Amino acid sequence: MGFAPLDPVLHNQLRLAVVSLLIAVDEADFNHLLDRTGATRGNLSVQLSKLKEAGYVEIIKGYKDNYPNTRCRLTKAGIAAFDAYVRAIKGYLGP
C-alpha cells in the first residue's frame, strides 16, 4: 500500500492555513485572514489568488462601512480538496 499524493495547491503552509481557517466558517474577510495567519498583505493576496485559480476559494469584493472589503469563502471543490488532503495526511501517520 502506497501513500496518497498530497494536493500541491494545499501543500503550502500559508494556503493550508487559509483553507483551515475557512473550513470552520462560512466566510472570512481579508483582514481576519491576515491577522490569523501573520502573513504579509502581498503574500496573502498571492496565495488567495492561487487558491482561487484552483477553484478552491471564492473571493467577493465589496464595501463595509464605506471601505473596500474583500471576503473569502471555500467552494465545494475547496471543501472536497481539504477533506481529501486531511485523509491523505492521516494515511501518512498510520493507524
Image: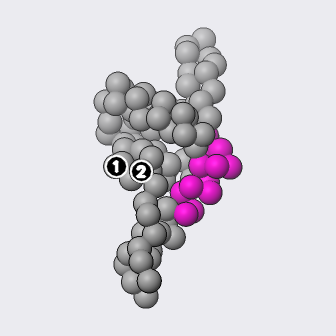
Residue 31 on the magenta span: no
Q: What is the magenta segment's predominant secondary structure?
A: helix
Residue drawn at x 50%, y 39% is: 51
Q: Residues under labels 1 and 2: Cα distance?
A: 11 Å
Toward the front, the furthest residue is 1
Classify mark 2: helix, strand or loop: loop
Residue drawn at x 59%, y 30% is: 59
Residue drawn at x 32%, y 39% is: 38
Q: Name the N-terminal-most of marks 1 and 2.
A: 2
Q: What's the magenta region?
A: 73-84
**Three-letter amino acid code of the residue under disc 2:** Pro
Res 14 → quadrant: top left
Give the x, y percent position of residue 69.
56, 21
Toward the bottom, the furthest residue is 95
Res 63 → quadrant: top right
Disc sitting over residue 8 in the figure: 2
* Above or below, comparing residue 39 to residue 69 in the picture: below
Look at the image and tell me whether residue 13 can be seen: yes
Image quarter (top left, top right, bottom left or bottom right) of the C terminus? bottom left
Residue linked to disc 1: 13
Classify mark 1: helix, strand or loop: helix
Residue 78 on the magenta span: yes
Q: Nearest the camera: 7 or 17?
A: 7
**Three-letter amino acid code of the residue under disc 1:** Gln
Disc sitting over residue 74 in the figure: none
Left or right of 14? Residue 26 is: right
Left or right of 67? Residue 38 is: left
Give the x, y percent position of residue 16.
42, 50
Look at the image and tell me whether residue 26 can be seen: no
Q: Nearest the camera: 75 or 26?
A: 75
* Above or below, comparing residue 94 to residue 29 in the picture: below
Toward the right, the furthest residue is 76
